[in-house]
Amino acid sequence: MPCSRSEALVEEILREFPSFRIAPKEGRALQRAIDLTLKVVTLGAQHEYLTRYHTVLGFTLYVPTRWPTTSDAARYVLLRHERVHLRQRRRYGAVGMALLYLLPIFPIGLAIGRARLEWEAYRETLRATAEVHGLAAARDPQLHDYLVAQFTSGAYGWMWPFPATIRRWIEEALAEIERTNRTGVSAEAEYAARSREVE
Ligand SMILES: [Zn+2]
C-alpha cells in the first residue's frame, strides 16, 4: 500500500504506463555521456544534469543524486511534470519525440519543439504546485523566475530565450488554474468531454 502522496502517484503512473520505472542517473555510462555532451554543447551552462535534473528516456525516469533526499511534495510535483513527458512519448512515439525534442540542439536556441513540450510539462508543474501548496505558491515570483530561466538559459540549450513570452504563458496557465478551481472543470477535461461526444 502506498503511504505517501508521491508513492500513490507512482502507482497511478504504473497503471497508465506499466513499463514505467525510476532509475538513478549516477553510475550509468549513457547518463554520463549525455552529461558530458550537454556540458560541451552549452559551453558549461548545463552542468547540473546529473545532480539536479530529472529526465524521462523511453518510459524510465532518470533521477539525479538529490532524489533520495527530495521531499514527498517535491517528488509529487516532479512526477506530475514527468507524467506529461510520458504521455508525450505515447502521443508522438520514440522517433517523433526525439525529433521534436533533440534535433534543434544544433544550432542551439530557438528550439520551439522542445520549448512547447517542456511548456506543456511545466504548466503541469504549476497546476500540481497549486494543488499541493496552494494558489499563492503557484503565483510565487521566485517560481516564475525559475520557470523563465529554464527556457531562456542554457539549462535546456536556450530553447526559447524570450522571457516575455514565457511570462505570458505563465499568466495564461494561472488564469486557467483559477478558472478550474472555481468551476472544478479544467480546459483539458472540457476538451476531452467534447471529443468523446463526437466519437
Ligand atoms: Zn521536462
Image (cartoon, grey):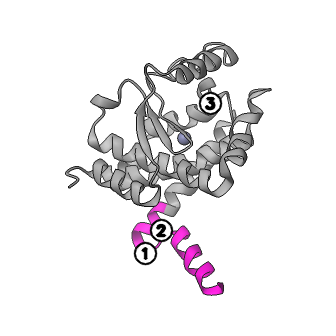
Above or below 65: residue 197: below
Does 194 lie within the magenta span? Answer: yes
Residue drawn at x 56%, y 43% as measured from the top left: 58
Q: Which residue is mark 3?
A: 156
User: Which numbered tag is attached to residue 179?
Assistant: 2
Magenta segment, which residues? 177-199
Q: Main secondary structure of the magenta part?
A: helix
Q: Secondary structure at mark 2?
A: helix
Above or below 48: residue 117: below
Where, by quadrant of the figure, is residue 166 drawn? top right
User: Which numbered tag is attached to residue 123?
Assistant: none
**The residue under label 1 is which amino acid type?**
Thr
Q: Secondary structure at mark 3?
A: helix
Q: Ligand 1, what quadrant?
A: top right
Q: Secondary structure at mark 1?
A: helix
Q: Which residue is mark 1?
A: 183
Residues at circles 2 and 1 in contact by the CB criterion of under 8 Å: yes
Q: Residues within 10 Å of mark 1 (few under 14, many from 20)?
A: few
Q: Residues within 10 Å of mark 2 (few under 14, many from 20)?
A: some
Alpha carbon separation for disc pair 3 and 2: 30 Å
Assign the N terminus to one quadrant of the image.
bottom left
